Amino acid sequence: MLAHIALTMTLVTAPQPLPGDGWVRFEVPAVAETQSMGCNRSERASLKSRNDHWSINNGHGEGVFPDARFDRIHVYVEMQGGEIEDVRSFTPNCDVEGSDKAVIVQMDPETAVRRLGKLSGDDEMQSRVVATVAHIDHPDAFDALVTWAEDAGNEGRGEDALFWLAQRRGDAGRAIVQAHAGEGWPMDHREHAVMSLALTERPAAVEFVREVARESSSSTLRARAAMALGITHAPGALADLHSIFLQDTDPEVREQAIFGMSQLDNPAVAQTLADIVREPRFGEHRRQALFWLTNVEGEESEAVMDALVDDIF
């Protein structure tokens, strides 16, 4: 009897073989706070187009599902000759064209991470693999991201891993990314780590980016952090960037601070840039401020431009 039970358990838990060809779908647990990925209300997802791979919505933009959270994701793998050739992943709310032809199998998250981690291919497919693994709620998925982030031989995959460690793996993931922003890594790798943290919009991560913008010994990294504060519309970024512009002596940092200010949705931006234009001691930065001032939209910026023209002419 015990032997029969043991045999039955072995049969149930044994890895399910995958078909030789065609699309296969399996379901795995998702990390906390997973939002709609791969579709929105106005567009149907598809397995057919290589360009129609999933994207993350994070509740932003029209036609998305801002309040929806999902504890599972659907992973589709395309089989050719018994080997996995491609991967797509979606949250269960997505209406996926072609999904009715996919064979549904069972796969535990550990096996999924192992099988997906063996895939090679072009940059787009590797990006899909990293993003899919990043959403799987299993320690092996976290470990895979950390390993990929440290792989200097595959820069694209490493940058994707940094992004998803910051976005989807909580405080532990963001701590890893902060370490990658430090000395000992190539500069472009450090810059990507800073940008990945800023894009999370998490208060602690944004505060770290502020510290980099003010205190890093690398002017290149300070410039990247200043730009990141602007394009992510960090709270209080106008005061931060104006202060950085006034206090930093590196021309590139100051230029990126001006650019960052121009990206903010703040009615005081136009006047701040105009004040830079009016000040002779700012030299070439006056031209940069004027250029970005002309790109700032809104009634406030129009009024500031009119006043500036009156002052000059």
Image: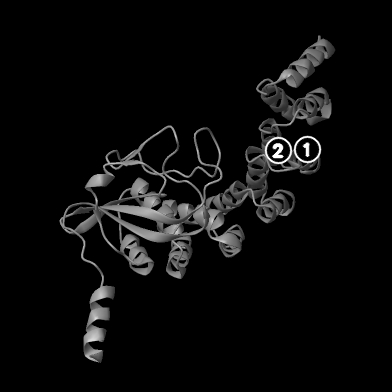
**Image position of 52 (left or right of 40):** left
Q: Nearer the viewer, residue 59 or 262?
A: 59
Position of 199 relative to 208 (above/below):
above
SS state under label 2 = helix
**Classed neighbour count for the residue bearing mark 2: other residues with Cα under 10 Å, few (<14), some (14–19), many (≥20):** many
Residue at far front of view: 1
Q: Secondary structure at mark 1?
A: helix
Q: Residue at x 50, y 42 (%)?
A: 57
Say which residue label 1 marks. 242
For badge 1, the amino acid type reads His
**Which residue occupies 43% across, 51% down?**
156
**Residue found 21% across the figure and 58% down from its top:** 83
**Callout 2 amino acid:** Ala
Residue 8 vs residue 39, the one in the foreground = 8
Q: Which residue is mark 2?
A: 257
x, y percent for residue 246: 80, 39
Give the class, few, some or many, for how many residues have Cα within 10 Å of label 1's Cα (few <14, many ≥20).
some
